[in-house]
Image: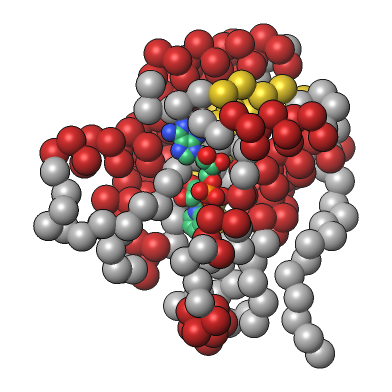
Amino acid sequence: MKITSMTNHSAIYPSLKGKRVLITGGATGIGAGLVEAFAGQGAHVGFLDIDAPAGETLAASLPGAHFRACDLRDLDATAAVLAELAEAIGGVDVLVNNAARDDRHTIEDVTPAYWDERMATNLRHQFFAAQAVVPAMKAQGHGVILNFGSISWHLGLPDLVLYQTAKAAVEGMTRAMARDLGADNIRVNTIVPGNVETPRQKQWYTPEGEAEIMAAQCLKARIQPADVAALAMFLASDDGAMCTGHDYFIDAGWR
Ligand SMILES: NC(=O)c1ccc[n+]([C@@H]2O[C@H](COP(=O)([O-])OP(=O)(O)OC[C@H]3O[C@@H](n4cnc5c(N)ncnc54)[C@H](O)[C@@H]3O)[C@@H](O)[C@H]2O)c1
C-alpha cells in the first residue's frame, strides 16, 4: 500500500465556525495552508505577511479573508496591523504565530546586528503579537495562541544556529505563557513541524536530500501544509479545550 499525506482533510469543527483568527506569515507555505483551512471551517480570517503580492493573491481567492502587508520586525507596524485586522474581522479568538525565515549561516558569519535581526524575525514578534491580543482574550474569557516552533533544534541540523536558538526559545515561551494565561482560559501551545513540503523548502532539496528525509522519517510520504493545518484546527477548536502548555509534533516520525 502506498502511504500518502492526507491532503483532503475532512474534519469540520463546529466550534471554529465564526471564530476570529489572526495569522502571521499567511501568504505562502504553511501559513497559506492555515489561512485556507481556517477559511474552510467558516472562520473569519485576518492575515499579514511581508510578501504583499502573494498575500493579496491569496486573499482575493478567499472571500471574507482580510490581508495586510507588514514586516513583523517592525513592532509598531505589527501592533497597528494586528489591531486593523482584528477590527476588520470583529475581534480575535485565535492567534497563530506562524511567520519565520530559516536563512542559513555559519557561526563565524554572525554579527550582533545579524543576531538581533534573526531574533526579530523568528522569535520577538511571537511574544509581542501575543501581548497585543491578550487584553481582548482576557476580556472575553477565552483565547487560543498557537506558536510555531521547529524540529530543527531537536535534531541539531547544520548551518541554522540562530533559527534553532529562536525556535528552542519559542517552546519555553509557550510554557511560560500557558502558565500565566491559563487562569484566563487562554490556551497556548507550540506546533513543531518536521520537514514540510513548501515552495521555499523545495528550493533546498535535491533528489538525494529528499531521499534522506524519506529514510529518516518513520512515515514514507512528504508532509504537506494541509497536514500541519489539520493539527492546528484541532488545537484551535474546542475539541482541544484541555490542551495547553505543550509542544505538538507533526513530523512523520523524523529522527
Ligand atoms: N516547512 C518546514 O519544513 C518547517 C519545518 C519546521 C518549522 N517550520 C515553521 O513553520 C512556520 C511556517 O514555515 P514555512 O515553511 O511555511 O515558511 P515559509 O518561509 O515558506 O513562509 C513563511 C512566511 O512568513 C513570511 N515572513 C517571513 N518573514 C516575515 C516578516 N519579517 N514579516 C512578515 N512576514 C514574514 C514569509 O513571507 C512567508 O510567507 C515557520 O514558523 C517555520 O519556522 C517549517
**Where residue 174 appears, x then y in whole percent?**
43, 40
Q: Residue at x 72, y 22 (%)?
A: 66
Q: Can residue 8 be seen in the rendering of this structure? A: yes
Q: Nearer the viewer, residue 185 or 148?
A: 148
Image position of 31 with respect to 46: above or below? below
Q: Residue at x 47, y 19 (%)?
A: 78
Q: Splitting the image into 4 quarters, where does residue 55 fall?
A: top right
Q: Can residue 235 be seen in the rendering of this structure? A: no
Q: Quadrant of the N terminus?
A: bottom right
**Where residue 153 appears, x then y in whole percent?**
34, 61
Left or right? Give the position of 24 relative to 38: left
Q: Splitting the image into 4 quarters, where does residue 243 fall?
A: top right
Q: Residue at x 51, y 63 (%)?
A: 203
Image position of 244 with respect to 85: above or below? below
Residue with the most extreme bottom position: 1
Q: Residue at x 39, y 62 (%)?
A: 152
Residue with the most extreme front position: 53
Image position of 10 with respect to 188: above or below? below
Q: Nearer the viewer, residue 85 or 190?
A: 85
**Where residue 51 appears, x then y in whole percent?**
55, 34
